[in-house]
Amino acid sequence: MLIPLVVALVLWSLWRRGGVPYQFAPLRLFTPEDWWWGGTVATPKTGEGIRARIVYDGVFFALLVYTMARLGGWAQAVHHFVGRRPQPGRALIALIAALLTLSFVFPDAFPLVGWDPLPVARPLLALTALVFGGIPSQTYADLLYTAITLLVLWPFALLGDWWPYLKERLAARRAVAVPGVPAAVVRPRAQWPELRDAGQDEAADVLTAEAGAGRMNDVDCARVTRAWAARRADFRETVLREGGAAWTHPSGARDLPRRAARHDLLTRQVRVGRWVAGDRTPLAYHDAGAALGPEALGTSLLAVGPSGSGKTRLLAEPVAEALSLQALTGGCALVAVSAPGGPLGPDAAYDVIVRLGDRSSAHDLDPYAGSDDPDEAAAILAEALAGDLDTVNGQAAATALAQLLGPYRAAYGVFPPLPVLRELLEGEPGALAVLRTAVADDEVMRRELEARTRQTGAPGDPGRALADRLALLNRPVFAGFLGSGATGAGGGAHRAFSLRAIAHHPLRVRIDLPERGHEEAGRLITRLVLAQFHAVVGAGRRDHFAGLVLDDATGAVTPDSVRRVQRLRARNAGVLLSLRTVGDVPESLHGPLFGAVGCRMAFAGVTTWDGGRFAQTWGTEWVETTEVAKHTVFADQPMTRALHALRKLVTGKAVTTDAVTVRQVERERWSASRLAHEVPPGHAVLSLTTVDGEHAPPLLVDLRG
C-alpha cells in the first residue's frame, strides 16, 4: 500500500519539474505548433497553450492516482481499516478524510492551509475554456465547483454509510418529536421486556423485584420464560402468587447442589471447551467457545476415545449436568447410564436412581418399560437379549418372546418375571403346563403357546439363546431387581420404575450398572435401556427434549439400534454414545453408525484404525497449495556467466530462479495419522450438526478451556 504511494510522489515531483523523458511529446503531437514557442520543449506562447498544459497535467495526475491506487489496493485497505468500524466512528473518520481531501482540492477555502491545489478543478476549467473559448458564466463555474465537491464527497459517503446513518438518527429523533408517541426504550432482560410489551406489567414487576432481590436464579428465569413462551392461561395469576418459584420442578429443586460446567440456560447450552485457533480453523471459530445443546444433541453424538482421555469427566458429566438443569426448567428429561464404578453426578441431581444389584436401591427398573402390548414388550426384550447376536434373527427372537408374553399376560394380567420367562423359554414342562392350563379357555392364546411349544428345541429355535442371555440376569446379585419382586435390604420391595415416565414428565433418571464381574450383564442392561428409550420417545408428542447419556455404550450398538438412532432427531430426542474404540462395534455397523449420528467426537489417543473411520466420515475439502521450485539459471552470454560465477564465489550458492505453482488440491479434513498423533491430551476433534441442518466442520477443541 505504501510503496505505490512513494512511487507516485516521486513521479509527480519529476513531472512537475519536467524531468520525465519525452514528457511533452504527446502534448506537442496533438496540439497546434503556434501554441508553443519555437526551439522550446513545451513553453506556452498563447493562452491556449497554457490551458493545454494545465489539462495535460490533470490527465497525467488522474492516470497516476488511478494506477497507483490499483497497484496498492488502496480501496481494500481503506475498507479494512475503516469499513469495519461501528457507527458513528466510521462516519466520523470518513468525514475527516473527506475534509482533508477537499483541503487539497480547494486549499483557498481553508484559511489555515497553505499548499498548492491538486490538479482537479483547474484542468476542468481549462478544458472548458479550450472547448468554448472561455468560461461561459460565473454560474457555470459555481456549478462545476459544486459537481467536483460532490464527486469528492461521494466515495467517502459510501465508506462512512452517511445516508443510512443519517436516516437512522432522523427516525429516532422523529419518534421522540411526535406528540403522544413514547420514545423507544431498550430495557435489560432483567426487567422482562417481553412481558411488558404484552401488557403483563404486574407480572414483570414481580419478577423484576424477585431477580433484583436475589430470589431468582438462571433456572427460575429459564423456567418462567418457557412458561411464557407456552402461553399458559394462568401465567399472570401464578406469577403474582408464587413469584420466581412459579412452576417449580415436582422435586422442589430450583438448582443443582453444585455445578462443574458453564451453562447458558436461556440458549440451553453447556460449554464443553474452546475452539483452538489454527491454520485450518476458520477465523470465526478462533478461541470461541464450543457448546452443546438440544439442537445438536438431537442428532445424537458419538464420542470415541481410550480410557483416561476425558470422555466421562469432560463430556458425559457436563452434558448430563446440562440436561439435569434443563429438566428443572421443564424443558428436558434425562436418562443417564453410568459406567460401573463412576456415577454421572451426585445423587441430589436426580429424581430417580436405580442401582441394579445394590440392595439399598430404592428403585427397580421395569424390564418391560410399563408396556401393556406383548409385541412391543417382546421387541424390547429381543433387542436387549439378542440384538448383538449374529446367530439369532431379531424378528424370530421377538416372535418367540411374544408367544410367551401374550398368553402369560392374558392369564395373569402382568408380564412374567424374568426367572419365570427363562423357564418358559427353556421349555420347562411344569411351567408350560401351568400356563397352558391358565389359558385353556382362550383359543387364540392357547394356539400361540402351542406354537411356541412345538418350536422349543427345534433347529433354529432362538429360545435357548434367549434363555442363556436371561441367565446372566438370574444371578443372586440381581435378586429383587428387574421385576423379580424380591425385597430390598430394608425389607420392602424395590419400587419398579418405568422408563415410559420420561415421555410425560421432565424426570432426571440415573441408572448405575453393577460392578465386579458382571460386564456382560451390564452390556445387556445398557441395550435394554437403549431399546426402552427408543420405544418410549417414539410414542406420542412431547414438548420437552429427551436425552439419553450412555457413559459406556460397549455392546449397545446393534443393527436395530442404529436405525432407531437416526430417527430420534425427528422425535425431539437424542443419545450420547461413548466408546473406548470403534472396535467395540461390529465392523459391519461402522459405516451405518457414523452415518446415523450427526455429531462426532474423536478424543486424544485414538488409534489410526479408529481415526480412519472418522477421516472417512468427515471426507475431504479443496485447499489451495503453493509449491516453490528453485531452478538453476544457465547464462548464454560470457559477461552474464562471469557475473554468476562471481556471485556464486561470494555467496556460495548457485544463481537460481523460483518457479511458483499454485493449485487446488483435495485433502482430508483430518487424516487418520493426524487424529492419532497430533491431538494433544485434553483435546478432541469435534464436528456438530443441528436438527435444522446447520453444521460446524471438524475442528480441534480444547476441552479444558
Image (cartoon, grey):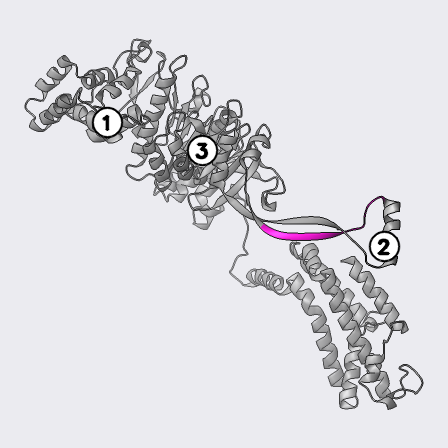
Identify the residue shown where x is 23% and y is 27%: 397
Seen in the image, is 534 located left or right of residue 616?
A: left
Residue 151 picture quarter: bottom right
- Between the C-alphas of marks 1 and 3, the distance is 28 Å
Q: Earlier in the sequence, mark 1 or mark 2?
A: 1
In the image, 34 versus 115, the foreground residue is 34
Q: Residue furthest right?
A: 39
Q: Give the vertical position of 184 relative to 263 (above or below).
A: below
Q: Which residue is mark 2?
A: 641
In front: mark 1 or mark 2? 2
- Dot 3 crowding, Cα within 10 Å, few <14, some 14–19, many 20+: many
Q: How many marks?
A: 3
471 relative position to 600: left or right: left
> In this picture, which residue range is highlighted in magenta?
652-664
- Residue flagged by tag 2: what amino acid is it? Arg
**Image position of 266 with respect to 256: above or below:** below
| Residue 220 coordinates in the image, percent (x, y) | 46, 34
Q: Position of residue 584 (x, y in %)?
A: 42, 26
In the picture of the structure, the residue carrying the numbered disc 3 is 302
Main SS class of the magenta portion in the image = strand
Residue 349 at what x, y percent from top left? 44, 24
Q: Which of disc 3 and disc 1 is earlier in sequence?
A: 3
Residue 508, quarter of the rendered image: top left
Which badge, 2 or 3, comes first in the chain's sequence? 3
Seen at 54% across and 42% down, the residue is 669
Q: Are marks 1 and 3 in contact (CB under 8 Å)?
A: no
Q: Which residue is mark 1?
A: 397
Is the C terminus in the top left, top right, bottom left or bottom right quadrant? top right
